[in-house]
Amino acid sequence: MESEIEEIAKKIEKGERLSLEEGLRLYDAPLLTIGELAKKVKERLHGKKVYYVYNQHINYSNICKNLCKFCAFGKPKGDPQGFTLTLEEIEQKIKARLDEPIKEIHIVGSVQPDLPFDYYVELIKLVHSLRPEAIIKAYTITEIAHFTEISGKNTEQVLRILKEAGVQVLPGGGAEIFAQRVRQKICPRKISGEKWLNIAQIAHRSGIPTNCTMLFGHIETKKERLEHLIALRELQDETKGFICFIPLCFHPQNTKLSHLPGPSGVDILKTMAISRIMLDNIPHIKAYWVMLTPKLAQVALNFGADDLDGTIIEEKITHMAEAQSPQALTRAELESLIRETGYKPIERDTFFREIN
Ligand code: SF4
């Protein structure tokens, strides 16, 4: 086994691509060995830079008709914890922060059964008019699929309308684990993995880059994780449209899968590192501090991640699953987390362009 890992390590150091089997074998290597390998890949790409963004999250609704079993955020109609914001309420949230140098507005919600397509378009136009200098990163691929259903338009048309309204990037949520075996059990009403990849491909071809995600640490096997990563890598070979990969660790609290333990710290760090190693064509790997906690996200910077996400200001999705992280971090807090690891904090925009 040791010699096998040594052979894989040599390939990584030479910048060669790993197969699914080699990626799987890495899970058996000692944690610090994988961490060192991922760190080398990350530093080859980004040197000592670690990125963050000054951003604001808007979650417009959590009323959802999909009700995925892993999700504590989505609520059925009539649930006392359910909410849908009016455009006026969203306007207030944006106006309340106009004095801050926000560079990105991240907008996601649920598969809302009642809102018309116009609401989603007007929401983008409103935010864009209030914050023309900020990049709007909005709507998961699951939401885009829902918009095609409610509007009667095809994916290209929906994306063109949203782009004209002001959407520049899709955040890449809804990927979960592509394996249909898993989706049938944890999110049977959600679009298939194949459909997710198809919409991402159309977005990239339409000039809308996206991020991409993987929700791990529930019922999926390690092989299904590797298959997921390789599907993303293959699409990236074709489109070059993924900016950043975000491994999202499952939070069982308040979900229908609350009997599961969720991923361990070692599993999270190994998955972060293996993602960096396998996704040799996706530029950035994010340690999303909301899900990881700022402390573990900080450690993940030594396991292949080069981005901490951002200030966020108000986060609902993971906090409804009792995330232990705060609702927001200041720029100074993010910079200090990064500096403590020996890396250099770099403020970025959504496209990872550096901000002075
Ligand atoms: S993950 Fe998304 S689609 Fe699934 S229940 Fe939660 S909000 Fe709804």
Image: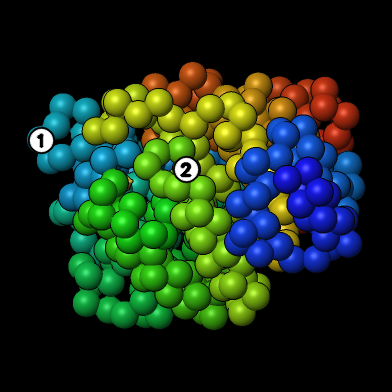
Q: Quadrant of residue 39?
A: top right
Contact between labelled residues 1 and 2, with CB atoms less than 8 Å apart: no
The residue lying toward the viewer, choosing from 108 and 181, is 181
Q: How is the image coloured?
A: rainbow
The residue lying toward the viewer, choosing from 196 and 147, is 196
**Height in image: 55 above or below 146?**
above
Residue plotted at (34% across, 24% down): 253
Judged left or right of residue 311, residue 122 is left
Residue plotted at (45% across, 47% down): 221
The residue sitting at the left extreme is 78
Residue plotted at (36% across, 76% down): 155
- Mark 2 crowd level (few <14, some 14–19, many ≥20, 10 Å Cα): many
Disc 1 Cβ-to-ligand 1 distance below 8 Å: no
Question: Residue 71: horizontal and vertical position, in percent?
Answer: 32, 38
Image quarter hosting the C terminus: top right
Judged left or right of residue 54, residue 49 is right
Q: Nearer the viewer, mark 2 or mark 1?
A: 2
Question: Residue 116: horizontal and vertical position, in percent?
Answer: 21, 61
Residue type highlighted by circle 1: Gly
Number of marks drawn = 2
Question: Residue 86: horizontal and vertical position, in percent?
Answer: 27, 44
The residue lying toward the viewer, choosing from 164 and 28, is 28
What kind of element bears circle 2? strand
What kind of element bears circle 1? loop
The answer to whether any part of residue 53 appears in the image is no
Residue plotted at (61% across, 79% down): 238
Q: Which mark is residue 78?
A: 1
Residue type highlighted by circle 2: Phe
Image quarter hosting the N terminus: top right
Q: Quadrant of residue 178?
A: bottom left
Q: Which mark is residue 216?
A: 2
- Of the two numbered discs 2 and 1 on the same chain, state the one appearing first in sequence: 1
